[in-house]
Image (cartoon, coloured by chain):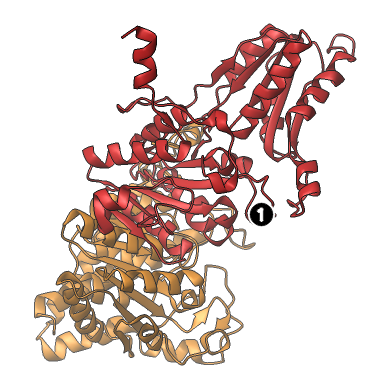
Chain colours: A orange, B red
Amino acid sequence: MLPTRDQKVWMYETMLVSRYFEETIEAIYLEGKKPVFNMAKGPIPGEMHLSNGQEPCAVGVCAHLTPKDVVTSTHRPHHVAIAKGVDLKRMAAEIFGKKTGLSGGRGGHMHIFDPDVNFSCSGIIGQGMGPAVGAALSRKLQGKEGVAVAYIGEGAANQGAFHEALNLAAVWKLPVIFVVEDNAWGISVAKATSTAVPNNAMRAQAYGMPGHLIPGNDPIAIYSAAGEAIARARSGGGPTLLDIETDRLAGHFMGDAEAYRPKGELDALRARDPIPALARRLQAEDGLSDDDNGAIMARARGRVDEAIKFARESDYPAPEEALDKVFA
Amino acid sequence: MSSVAAAAVNERRLTIARAMAESIAQEMRIDPRVFVMGEDVGPLGGVFGNTRGLFDEFGAERVRDTPISETAFMGAAVGAASDGMRPIVELMFVDFFGVCFDAIYNSMAKNTYFSGGTVKVPVVLMTSTGGGYSDAGQHSQCLYGTFAHLPGMKVVAPSNAYDAKGLMTTAIRDENPVIYMYHKGLQGMGWLGTEPAATVNVPEESYTIPFGKAAIVREGKDVTIVGVAMGVHNALKAAEKLATQGVSAEVVDLRTLVPLDRETVFASVAKTGKLIVVDEDYQSYGMTGEIIASIVERDLSVLKAAPQRVAYPDIPIPFTRPMEQFALPNPEKIIEAYEKMKGRRGWRWM
């Protein structure tokens, strides 16, 4: 299964939106945090996990999804949220802690919920896996269309939740796709130090489901594998595990000095940045002109700028609104 | 037929287990979103009988036996509820919460808040509590306070079958996560030993009991005894004995810990001037302290004596019978607590 030119252009543009968004957030995050870095300071306080480099995992899978499909994402959620169609302005406002944010500022960057497009994420490793299985069960019981996609990092594959969720989805033959974004690092711990098998696709076999290893951080290869897995899930074939080798071009979180990275690794990863790589492919294979490319980049930048402006200009919630919304 | 005879014919004495199952069945008949999942809830009908008959009526799709994977199915309950279903999920023993607490505390209880109210998580989490039958400290805890402490969940603990049915119906219809904590010693399972007073007349038709509304199960004027579940039965037995000594005890069954009916407790203590709180959960940082604090911080002057608590000591629950029975609350300890108050004076003289 290969993407059409339009799908490739959508993936490219969405990756650009995501990257511009992260770069803009990065710059604003550092406001008020120099010369002394203090996470509590500036217009965006708290932890910040940027997704630079992992955009192919988001667009290659989400290209096959509609708003009705369910996605649970991780503590590093922005690229997936953008590809799933989460309201960018309200997501930005949530990251700033503003009243106009998706949750009125209660959740922040690790707790983004947009029920309009069935997106959620959470701050704890592997936490979204059970809920994705449950959402898929819900669709099966209601006879309603839709699949569920659980994104996790490769570190989460050593959590009990991973193994329990794979087994449950398989034994109930539910329409779930488990997507491992393997960026090779669990904060500072290399995959080889934490994981007894060379890749997590192998682990699918233990739960009687297909597991596909997708190297290369290539959105088109991810698109193909995800397309098959999602079509299988939609037709009642049950769950699939997709193990995507990707690159984390930023630190684990903002402020991470990354002293644990081998010398030269980051430069090598940057040299194979998936976004210019896709641009080159579009130019070579699909006749993307410089003018087209310029227009796409301007459009992506425009969306991000509009969202950030909305977030900046929005008001903070009244402090006492903290007491609301504990119960529905 | 006289009206007395008619009442006797119509009386349906049900165990808490039967009452829970009846409520679930009635809700499943009218609401296709309701389904049950957990370990042994299917053909077995629940280890503690609370899903008996459901599998036969509703089948394996809506009454789902799960693998022993609490982390996965508790998380699945969150996902299904957020997607429009109303799962009833069984955690066989509350003591097992340790293997799935992230799904309960960090997702189920927080997602409504973290979503700014746009996500609802209407899960009913059924779980058994309580000891007294030598099952030791991984199968005998109550942990009411553990669940009542973290915001975002409602906490139900019935003392009898009438309340059990009405509270279950309310729980299933609630838009929020509810942990429904049923005491094994009240469940009516013969093999566990059971408190006969928990088995009471239960109407067949569906009804609800509102959350946050305590019941005064015995009226009195000299002392207020507050409890939930088995604590209520211990309190009632103590009240019987106190009555023979000329002491009139009022017994308050909280029925729900969250929301907590502080008003009814306060009104009762304002009347009696004396308060004993009974809890089979651990004493420190628990329900007993919360109830006493809610009186003291509102108006110390209503107290004629220092409040007393009869709770589980801060020890893991031991296996051997003499040790476990030594540690459990019982009517004698409640009477001793009352005796202690007799010799003491209230705040004016303290």
Query: As displayed, is residue B321 above or below residue A128?
Result: above
Q: Is residue B326 visible?
A: yes
Residue A156 image point, x, y percent: 48, 74
> Mark 1 Cα within 10 Å, few/some/many (few <14, many 20+)?
some
A91 relative to B59 in the view: left or right = right
A89 relative to A5 in the view: left or right = right
Query: As displayed, is residue B290 above or below residue A182?
Result: above
B340 relative to A278 in the view: left or right = right
Query: As displayed, is residue A295 above or below residue B196?
Result: below
Residue B95 image point, x, y percent: 60, 54
Q: Amino acid at mark 1?
A: Asp
The mark total stands at 1
What secondary structure is found at the residue carrying circle 1?
loop
Q: Is residue A44 visible?
A: no
Instruction: Tell me what residue is drawn at x 42 percent, y 89 percent.
Output: A199
Q: Which residue is mark 1?
A: B135
Q: Chain of mark 1?
A: B
Task: Find the residue positioned furthest to the front.
Answer: B1
Which residue occupies the foreground of this view, B33 or A32? B33
Quadrant location of the N terminus of chain B? top left
Residue B93 image point, x, y percent: 55, 53
Instruction: Tell me what residue is drawn at x 42 percent, y 65 percent.
Output: A74
Residue A279 image point, x, y percent: 22, 83
Query: As displayed, is residue B213 above or below residue A253?
Result: above
Which residue occupies the foreground of this view, B53 or A230? B53
B17 relative to A57 in the view: left or right = right
Image quadrant where residue B4 sits: top left
Instruction: Tell me what residue is drawn at x 72 percent, y 31 percent.
Output: B289
Which residue occupies the foreground of this view, A263 or A171? A171
